[in-house]
Structures are given as structure tokens and as C-alpha cells.
Image (cartoon, helix red, strand yellow):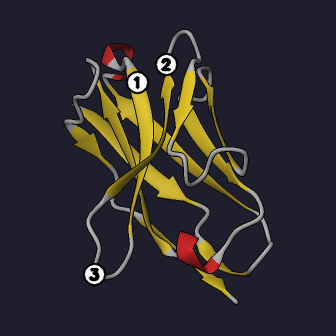
Amino acid sequence: QVQLVESGGGLVQSGDSLRLSCAASGRTFTIWHMDWFRQAPGKEREFVASVNWNAGIARYAESVKGRFTISRDNAKETVYLQMNTLKPEDTAVYYCAAGRQPAEYPYWGQGTQVTVSS
């Protein structure tokens, strides 16, 4: 099992920056990728960004490309989401997820709220 704990959410203004963290524990050696998803009120959960745990290859949703950066610190077993130029439409609960194979997400964090005011 892998446990994920997010932190770093909060209330910011449009144009501000915020960095989310997701600390992994447990059988972290089984992780192949770690991801960020988000869910806004009344909407379905959507993919935000993903990083390959070993190679560090990242990919992003089009809506955040150029503004968000995903990174990982293998020594700290932590993945980060640096969010710049935040917009009100980025308001959502952000979830960290991890998997052992592509497109597999057996592990989820509890979520952290990000609110961007206009």
C-alpha cells in the first residue's frame, strides 16, 4: 500500500502562485507515476499533470500547460505542483494520485482546496 498526503492549498488572488506538495509513504518503490487531478464544484474530476517517478517525464492538461509545473523529489518521496498565474477557473479540490502502471490510479490522497478569487 501507498499513502499520499497533500498540502499547500489555500485562498489566493488571480495571478498569484501556489505550490502543492504530495508526500508518499509505504511501498513507494512500487510507484511508477504520480499525478495531480482536480475537481471543481459540480464538475467531474479532471487530470492536471503527471510525472514518471524514475525518468521524471512530465505531461500536462492543455488548460494548465505553461502555467503549472510538476516535479518530484525522489529522496523526499514527494511530488510538487507549482501553480503560477492562477485563474478563478483553477478553483478546485486538488488530489494527488499514484500508480504502478500507466493509467492506473489505485492510490489517492485526501485532497487539498485551492480557491482563486478574481
Quick one: 78 or 105, which is closer to the camera?
A: 105
Q: In the rendered structure, which amino acid carries the disc numbered 2?
A: Trp
Callout 1: few (<14), some (14-19), or many (20+) C-alpha neighbours within 10 Å? many
Are the two marked residues, 3 and 2, in contact with CB atoms closer than 8 angstroms?
A: no
Residue 53, which numbered label? 2
Q: Quadrant of the C terminus?
A: bottom right
Query: What residue sits 43% from the left and 32% below the top?
Result: 34
Is residue 84 shown left or right of residue 36? Answer: right
Question: 37 or 88, which is in the foreground?
Answer: 88
At label 3, which amino acid type do we have?
Answer: Gly
Residue 19 in the image: above or below residue 33: below
Name the residue beneath numbered marker 3. Answer: 42
Residue at 50%, 45% in the rendered image: 61
Secondary structure under tag 3 reads loop
Label 1 to label 2: alpha-carbon separation: 5 Å
Q: Which residue is mark 1?
A: 33
Q: Is residue 4 left or right of residue 68?
A: left
The quarter of the rendered structure image containing the N terminus is top left
Check contact, mark 1 vs mark 2: CB within 8 A. yes
Q: Quadrant of residue 104?
A: top left
